[in-house]
Image: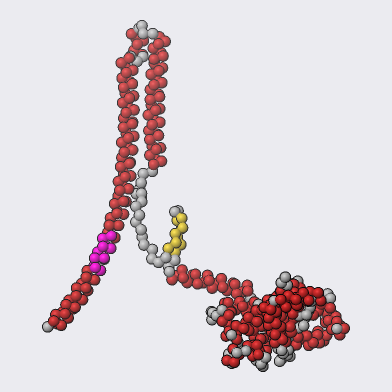
Amino acid sequence: MKPSNEILIAYLYGELEEPTRKQVELYLAQNPMEAANLQEMRELRENLQKIPFKMPQKPLVLSRNTNHTSHKALFSPFVRNFMAMAAAIALLLVVAYITQFRLNGNAEGWQLSFGDVREKNNPTTPANSIDTLQLVRWLENKQRKAYTDIYHKISALDNKVNESQKYGHNSESNNKEFFTKTEVLALLQKLRKEDYEVFKEVLASSSQEQQLYLSKAFEGFASYWEQKRQEDLEQIEASLSTFREQASEKFKENDVILTKLIDNQK
Amino acid sequence: MFASDVLIAEAQNGNQQAFNKLAEKWYPTIYNFAYKYFCDEDKAMEATQKTFINVFQGIEKLQDSKKFKSWIYRIAHNVCHNEHKKEKKRNLLSLFRYKNQEDEAIDYLPIVDEDIYANPASYLDKQESSELLEKALAQINPDQKVVIIMKEFEGMKFSEIAETLQISENTAKARLYYGLQALRKIVEKTFI
């Protein structure tokens, strides 16, 4: 059984008890490779023993380096960290200045930008767009007013009908104080007509407002698309101009090559 | 031993002269230990000075004067270990240190004669062998190196090494075994 490295090293230094030492010796006798390994370590030890004791060349001087206190304080970890942070912030500010960094906040949120800011015409709702809430309120008022009128008229009619039933239809004079059937029909017709007029007026007003809104929205879209179109045209013009220049250069090069070829042919 | 105990006791009581004598007595030993650790006189001197400053600052706290030896070696070991870590950090931060440890190990050792290839073992017997071994020793794992130094050069027992480094005896033995193997490999790699 192979002894552990700890036992082998103790054997090498002669610090093993007799029975264990004999076991190791028996093992080494049976394992020449291990014995050679141990022999090499023994030789190494012998060589290590030849290394002389190193005597100090200078006397021992014990000092606490009090002269360097200010220097140490200046470069203490805290000061160094602080200086590093300050330097990093200064660097950031310089970079922000060079790159024209901007930070804008508005109702839509925060906006980071670098370099020149270009105005952007996005399609938006017209500036003087309709206030929908206002429209709803107006319609509600109209409706409420119409209903109030109708309610009053129906109440009056109801009262008169009740009176008519109470006193009967016998006398001609009494009949004059109440509505006749024709009058009631005419009144109802009138009510219907008024409702129709109110409804028509509401619809017309709503339609007019919607048209105004749509017109303003289309106007915004139209100006945006017009601007986009102008930009695209400018880009196409620039590309064509570049292409023309390049083509012209190529033609010139071709002319030169052809001239040279013709000259060579001559 | 008695004289040492008296010196330690006096130094603990704030006797400056006793401490100076104690330092004078241990100075070569600790310097030799640090030199074997770094294989560099300046680093060894710096580590020795720091060790004695720590000894001066902490001697009052030493409860058992019989443990002074293992205590001072522990301080020396800690100082050397910290200095080694600082050096490693500096090397890591340096833009000019790009070689790996194996390359350094080869570059660090001086160029040797061609006859060493014939018989490396006998070459070690020559005058330069000690210096070469010292430099090879400086390159092995610090934990293994310190055990080799304590065992080979300071003549400490395994129990003393274990107490100083606050490890078990078996750990000390294992570190010594693997340390010697590593040292042998470095020497072989250098010469073959």
Judge by depth and name the residue closer to the eye, B30 or A73: B30
A81 lies left or right of A130: right
| Residue B124 locus on image (x, y percent) | 66, 89
Q: Position of residue B151 (x, y in %)?
A: 74, 81
Q: Is A238 included in the stretch rendered in magenta?
A: yes
Q: Main secondary structure of the magenta part?
A: helix
Looking at this view, is B137 or B32 the one in front? B137
Q: Is residue A46 above or below residue A240?
A: below
Q: Is residue B2 visible?
A: yes
> Could you say which quadrant of the image residue A43 lies in?
bottom right
Examine the image and state in which quarter residue A140 appears.
top left
Q: What colour scheme has been applied to the protein in the rendered image?
A: secondary structure
At 34% from the left and 28% from the top, the residue drawn is: A195
Q: Nearer the viewer, residue A44 or A99?
A: A44
Asked if the magenta segment contains residue A53, the reply would be no
- Which percent across, then down, holds residue A248? 20, 72
Q: Looking at the image, which residue sits at the far left? A: A266
- Residue drawn at (59%, 85%), measured in percent from left and top? B192
Q: What percent of the width, then of the height, locates residue B136?
A: 64, 84
At x 35%, y 11%, the residue is: A175
Seen in the picture, residue A9 relative to A156 is either above or below; the reply is below
Who's the residue at 38% across and 31% down the image?
A143
The magenta span reads A232-243
Height in image: A31 above or below A172?
below
Residue A260 relative to residue B60: left or right: left
Question: On the picture, is A93 further left or further right than A129?
Answer: right
Q: Which of the pair B38/A204 is nearer the observer?
A: B38
In the rendered image, the quadrant that contains the N terminus of chain A is bottom right
Q: Quadrant of residue B130?
A: bottom right
